[in-house]
Image (cartoon, coloured by chain):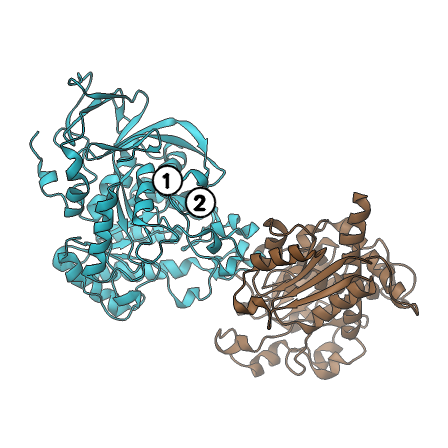
Chain colours: A cyan, B brown
Amino acid sequence: MTPTTASTTASAADAAATGADRAAAPALLIRGGRPYGEDVADVLVEDGTISAVGPDLSAPEGAEIVDAEGCIVLPGLVDLHTHLREPGGEEAETVETGTRAAARGGFTAVHAMANTTPVADTAGVVEQVLQRGEDAAWCAVHPIGAVTVGLGGERLAELDAMAGSRARVRVFSDDGKCVSDPVLMRRALEYVKTFDGVIAQHAQDPRLTEGAQMHEGRVSAEIGLTGWPSVAEESIIARDVLLAEHVGSRLHVCHLSTAGSVEIVRWAKQRGVDVTAEVTPHHLLLTDEEARGYDAVYKVNPPLRTRADVEAVREGLADGTIDIVATDHAPHPADAKDREWDTAAFGMTGLETALGIVQQTMVDTGTLTWRDVARVLSETPARIARDLDQGRPLAAGEVAHVLVWDPRPAAEVDPEEHASRGRNSPVAGRTLPGRNRLTLLAGRPTVRDSRLAEH
Amino acid sequence: MKHLTGIGDLDRASAIELLDTSTRMVATQERQMRKLPTLVGTTVVNLFMEDSTRTRISFEAAAKRLSADVINFSAKGSSISKGESLKDTALTLRAMGADAVVVRAPASGAAHKLAHSGWIDVPIVNAGDGTHQHPTQALLDSFTLRRHLGGEQRDGERAGSVDGQGLDGLHVVIVGDIMHSRVARSNVQLMTLLGARVTLVAPPSLVPVGADVWPCDVLYDLDEAIALAPDAVMMLRVQRERMLGGGYFPSAAEYTRRLQLTQERADRLPAHAIVMHPGPMNRGFEIAGGVADGPRSVIVEQVAAGVSVRMAVLFHLLASNAREES
């Protein structure tokens, strides 16, 4: 099979992470599944590449046959917002454990946020993260670069050096902190045009959220936790879409969480602003009511909002205002959560439960089709990140990053079974649908029947 | 009732029962020998992670008058100030054999966490958590209200028993920093549970967003509230530190002009109306000194009621539960 355009332009990350195994992997026939949840078609994978898609394909001699009857076949998922914690936060997660979690979740690529120790604000750090991803080889790891030095919000990091490094960074974010200085944000947006980069903004006005613990509203008023008002997110998004329009650059809004934010992004898109937005699985499912028991597993930034906000972000995802689902997977050691709410860490795990939540909230409700799921969890995140090797069609000639998802079984989420070091799953004890039948990374199985396939 | 972490742990009947028990405790405090043998052999820990001499002393007196052993564990100089977590502190107290923990903490929800995280399995009494709840303060406030204004005695002599009664028909105005007040939150819940009408008065910047669903009215003008002829006015302490950094209001002078309970404002209250303050007071700020010391003031009585109410709470959590188990 000759390499396709896609695979020849694959990022260094993918090539190195997957190339070594490509030739050795035996042929594999995914039989009876439904690509994109549509008509039944077999998918034949040879030499790491999809060699044929169609009904009733015959298996080459020696090929493994995977019975995918009743399953959905999707391009491997791509997460644009992952905290792998390494370097510096290895008690919470490592590149190895985080990418194992990603594979179990059906992901074939993750974008690793820059808020590590040291911060990923130099070519050296992003290349280190890249290398660790290649060594782990559970999925492609694309480092995200910091926008400002040390996430300090004061001066730009050397963005071009990161872009030109072996990690080929295209997404820049101070996630965890907002680039709140409007001049600095403007400069960052302008500067990344050099290499078609994008600024992924953590939209949070710092002054409006001093000491903030949870969504500001009826629940916070009652239980006495300092409020994180919706306007602190919305005002930054409004400013940023206008800045992006003014300088003609690309903006990506991280973890959009409020009904007002959906309205602002919808308005900006109507104006032609080059803005994309993401929503997390937890913001599609959970509300601020969860905070009533002071269980800090529900403490997250931006906070869980109201039922009306949940409805609005679902609508926004359905109508395309919100482009993608990204996990904001944020593992923490148990001690960082098993404490008073005020002093507990922000963040929840998400990689291993993302697709189950999306199926439950969006597909099983008839809001999204499986083809939409491929768009919001694979194709568009890859496109935003200019990740040319991922989020590709399930078609002959494409690199075989494939997820076979059985939507029928349902199971109770037990964080103890997760590959992530984090046990801070906000859906622990809930029943979620679906099972990762098979995940292929360039044709090599990383997961079979929701268990990691060691390599 | 296993714990008292907030007014949400009570229903009307159990709240009234606590007030009735408090009345009986008051009677015991009028005897020459005030100490009761009820809790001999039990150990009550006062875990105070935030300074509060008044509340700690009140709980200590309550426990000691029921013959419990009291251990005071306060933040300053303790392992907490060295960074020990609430969880480790709870495990330590469990290992030491505490029979009940009275907790005051700067974090909202700290008492709830102690009660429900499995770190320690003894009754937890919330002595104030962050900006959340202060249930014994609310109980002593309702106790004081009922004693003065309860039932049919409002316009007549104070006589006879108020046992079994709530606060039905009373109108209480609570004035001040509602946003940061655990006293206000607990009082709104308990007073309305007992049948009273509550009106909050505060500058809009000190009313929490989301308070619109609370079972009370919110006014911005103290004179407007006084014109409603309430039966009681409770002034909350204004935390001066909230003025500058937070900018919740422009100046002390502007605050006192609009919201101080001055003698002139107090004179406009109905004859029977009482003036309350959970303490500590800023005389001359939220309340004029003359009003605090004046004939309407029941502020010192509130303090006395505090001991009796806390005796009642400890009695119900420790003595009654033990009786039920045996």
Residue B261 picture quarter: bottom right
Camera sees residue B128:
yes
Camera sees residue A321:
no
Residue A352: numbered disc: 1
Cα gap from disc 2 to disc 1, whole angstroms: 9 Å
Q: Is residue A380 left or right of residue A339?
A: left
| The furthest residue to the front | B95
Tell me, yes or no, whether the two marked residues, 2 and 1, touch with CB atoms within 8 Å: yes
Q: Chain of mark 2?
A: A
Q: Nearer the viewer, residue B238 or A102?
A: A102
Q: Rate crowding at label 1 as few (under 14), some (14 to 19) or many (20 or more) other CA atoms within 10 Å.
A: many
| The furthest residue to the left | A2
Above or below residue A426? Residue A149 is below
Question: Residue type at mark 2?
Answer: Ser
- Where is residue B301 shown, x and y percent of the image? 80, 71
Q: Chain of mark 1?
A: A
Give SS at disc 2.
loop
Residue B100 picture quarter: bottom right
- Residue at image coords 71%, 72%: B54
Residue A285: numbered disc: none
Q: Quadrant of the N terminus of chain A?
A: top left
- Residue at image coords 52%, 48%: A289
Residue A452 picture quarter: top left
Q: Rate crowding at label 2 as few (under 14), some (14 to 19) or many (20 or more) other CA atoms within 10 Å.
A: many
